[in-house]
Amino acid sequence: MKTLKIIILIIAAIVITGYFVLQDNPEDFVTYQTYASGLKSFETDYGTMKYYDEGEGQVILLVHGVPTNSWMYRNLGKQLSENGYRVIAPDLIGFGASQRVTNYNLHDFDIQAETLFALMEGLEIDSWEQVTHDMGGIISWHMAKEQPEKISHMYILNTILYAETFNPPADFSYSNPVHRFVLGLYAHPSIGKLIVNMMITNGTRDYIIPDSVRVGYWLPIRDGAMSLVHFFTHTKYIKENIDTYRSWLVDSGISVSVLWGEDDPFLDSSSAQMLQQEMNISDNDIVILKGARHLVAEESYQEIAEFIIEHE
């Protein structure tokens, strides 16, 4: 009985502590909400896409992954737009400030690729450079297959390339109601906030991210987590098909640079060397970001911006 009481007290202490730690501070919302309200809108066949569009000059498209959105690129985008680039950074359908869709299949990677082509066509942009991160790589490989002539250069940041270097937390199944329920917790105000904050902490190293910045990662997910459910129930499928996806990039003729966080716990940095060998990429186009982890566009944006600006 005494042991049970101790366990109950410990659980109560954890719950109470979590309640106060996870309390929202509306003042922290302002920076992200101001950013989101300034995004432009584009009507796709699947809903409204919000996107960042700043600067003039060479066009560069920044494609995010999970559980992020264009907010992750806010600093990189600013650096590039101030140095001769026109930066286009969309929130993929179902992510960020873009419209939520309840149809699971509308989050498919080929549809996301289709909407990005539609956006660029709508903006009357015929050719561009492209940055891709995380799940955005799978979307980008679909784009490389469909219209490789549109992409003049691809900058790859910690992206899914090889089954043996892809380390998701777990392989979930959409057909399993328990898995769907667990993933749906991303949208829970407290639990989702906790999970995403843990992912941010695990995805960076020695990089202080204030609460006002973290908000831009977890707050949008409260509007719906179907986009994350789709990705995390596709990890096994991705592993089974990644060789085909990667072949679309390898065979596309698109020139490639790779910038990779050295200590990424989800996507091993050996991917960079493996792709270098497979595509015969020069040493000058392979950069291992020392000490960086997964969210390199957050913690290493200055190094990435400098590389892109100076790249020939």
Image (cartoon, rainbow, N blue to C red):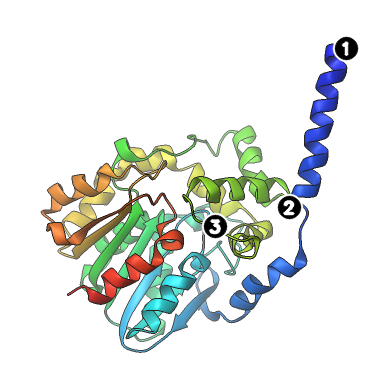
Visible in this render: residue 110? yes
Q: Which residue is mark 3?
A: 208
Residue 80 place in picture, x, y as percent: 37, 78
Would you identify the image quadrant in which residue 176 lies? top right
Which mark identifies residue 2?
1
Q: Amino acid at mark 1?
A: Lys
Residue 64 place in picture, x, y as percent: 44, 62
Q: Quadrant of the C terminus?
A: bottom left
What is the residue that sits farthest to the bottom in this orientation? 56
Real-space CA distance between mark 1 and mark 2, rounded to the nearest whole angstrom: 34 Å
Q: Which residue is mark 2?
A: 189
Q: Amino acid at mark 2?
A: Pro
Residue 144 place in picture, x, y as percent: 26, 63
Element carrying mark 3? loop
Query: 82 or 70, which is in the foreground?
Result: 82
Element carrying mark 2? loop
Residue 75 place in picture, x, y as percent: 46, 72
Which mark identifies residue 105?
none
Q: Are marks 1 and 2 in contact (CB under 8 Å)?
A: no
- Identify the residue at horizontal 31%, vertical 88% (top origin): 57
Classify 10 Å Cα crowding around label 1: few (below 14), some (14-19), many (20 and above): few
Q: Quadrant of the N terminus?
A: top right
Q: Considering only vertical position in the picture, is 136 above or below 182?
A: below
Q: Considering only vertical position in the picture, is 17 above or below 54?
A: above
Visible in this render: residue 119? no
Q: Earlier in the sequence, mark 1 or mark 2?
A: 1
Q: Amino acid at mark 3?
A: Ile
Residue 100 appears left or right of 300: right
- Identify the residue at horizontal 66%, vertical 39% (top origin): 181
Q: How many marks?
A: 3
